[in-house]
Amino acid sequence: MRDLQYYKKYYREKYPNLSDKQITDLAKAALAKDSQNASATNTLPSFGDTQSESTAGTRGVLVGFGLTDKDGNDLYIMPGLFPQFMTTLSVKNPKAYNTILTNVYRATGTKYKDPNTLGTWLQGVGRNLLASSRQDATAANISMEALVNANIVNRGTAGIFGTGEEPNIPTRQIYNIPTADIAAKIDKDAQSILGRAITDDDKSQDWYINLTNTISDMYNKGIVTKTKVVKNPKTGKKERQVIQTPGFSEEKISEVRTKALEEADPLGFERKQNLDFANWAMQKMGGRG
């Protein structure tokens, strides 16, 4: 924990020619800034372990709204904990709570009067999102915030804060995948398909440059989320449907990598196939020649 003495020592070493008073003033200003940043940080209210309801290895749903866990990482919560979480959040971090309350009102037209009721609504949304993520891996990267914002429509009130978004504008969630991550997956596939790693010479070739650009473009298509109001044939009541259209899939990207590697080095691909077959045959024969 940084204190006044820490900053005095820091500024004394950095500015040896300043007076003691100047050093003290700088240290006090830095300490005040630390305190201000700490109070403004949205952290997880310490009401309990949000991972305790973990089912089938899942860590819950991504919350968003700038909320983080105690380590500063993106906050994930099991849907069943939302009523309790929102009740605590309304006390511990009213600014974040009011942001969620406002966005949910603008998305649904319903003013939830207490945190528990709001949390119950979020619980239902979270369960739907969690169920989708178990069927489609891309849904696991969608936050509650993104879903709520995708549902925001202009109801003639322009929202509580008067922002007035146009109704039913699709939301596109873009995946900013670092180039190094794309290169690492190409290299891993090359070792599996060609039996060798990607070289610097490979990286200068048109096929490699085109491959990385193609994969980057696929990620940039992201996931488009649209909403529409439909009548439930069973209940006869209107409900809002959220339709998500992925612009890519990891399976498709893997196919693109495989095809590009096979075409770039057909001899290496054939040699690796022959080697794999020989190893397989040796195993079948128990290692006998």
Image: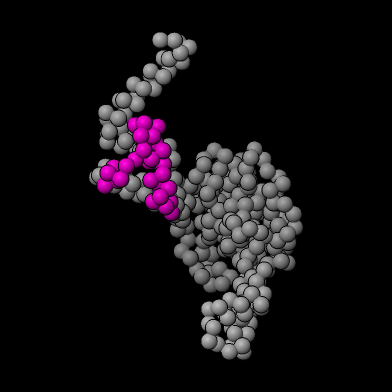
What colouring method underlies this structural image?
one colour
The reply to whether the magenta stretch includes residue 198 is yes
The reply to whether the magenta stretch includes residue 16 is no
Residue 82 location (% of width, % of height): 69, 54
At 70% across and 61% down in the image, what residue appears?
A: 45
> Quick check: can you spot residue 82?
yes
At 53% across and 51% down in the image, what residue appears?
A: 142
**95 and 105: which one is in front?**
95
Residue 11 location (% of width, % of height): 57, 79
Q: Give residue 89's quadrant in the image.
A: bottom right
Total numbered labels? 0
Residue 120 location (% of width, % of height): 69, 53
Judge left or right: residue 169 versus residue 270. right
At 63% across and 58% down in the image, what residue appears?
A: 71
**190 and 94: which one is in front?**
190
Quadrant into which the C terminus falls: top left
Q: Give residue 84's quadrant in the image.
A: bottom right
Up-down relation of residue 28 to residue 86 (above or below): below
Residue 194 location (% of width, % of height): 34, 31
Quadrant into which the N terminus falls: bottom right
Image: magenta residue range: 176-204
